[in-house]
Amino acid sequence: MAYVVTDPCRGVKDKSCIEVCPVDCFIEGEDQLFIIPDLCINCGNCESVCPVSAIFADEDVPAKWVHYIELNRTESDRLLAAK
């Protein structure tokens, strides 16, 4: 299990989540943040500080945003490769 950043983050990128993440598993995309699933330790710190309620445990992602589970993986991989 990993946490997932979903649609409410688009255009917001508040970054409160980055400040509380003990393992630095966030990566910034063009219009939102993403979680690198292989680095996420499932601590849940980020979920409670997100001001737009965009972060969910992957098993709790609302059905309308379930595609964000794969999007976090593919976008974080793409962004890491571009570094």
Image (tube, rainbow, N blue to C red):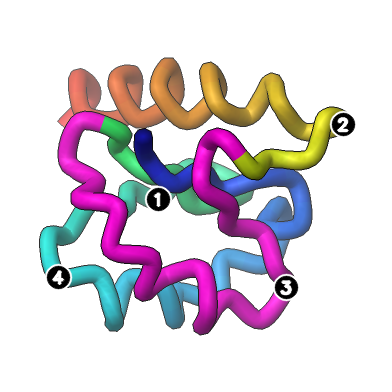
Residue at which label 2 appears: 64
* In this rendering, position of residue 74 left or right of residue 12: left
Q: Position of residue 15 (x, y in %)?
A: 45, 74
- Kind of residue indicated by mark 4: Pro
Q: Position of residue 63 (x, y in %)?
A: 83, 30
How far apart are the two marked residues, 1 and 4, measured between alpha carbons? Answer: 17 Å
What secondary structure is marked by label 1? Answer: strand
What secondary structure is marked by label 4? Answer: loop
Query: Disc 4 or 2, which lies upstream in sequence?
Result: 4
Q: Which stretch did the figure color magenta? A: 38-59
* In this rendering, position of residue 4 left or right of residue 19: right
What secondary structure is marked by label 3? Answer: loop
66, above or below 50, in the image? above
Q: Position of residue 33 (x, y in %)?
A: 49, 52
> Which disc, if any, is residue 22?
4
Query: Disc 3 or 4, which lies upstream in sequence?
Result: 4
| Mark 1 or 4, closer to the camera | 4
- Kind of residue indicated by mark 1: Glu
Query: Mark 1 and 3 residues: CB-CB less than 8 Å, in contact?
Result: no
Q: Is 51 within the magenta?
A: yes
Residue at which label 3 appears: 52
Residue at which label 1 appears: 28
Query: Which residue is at 12% across, 60% downward?
Result: 23
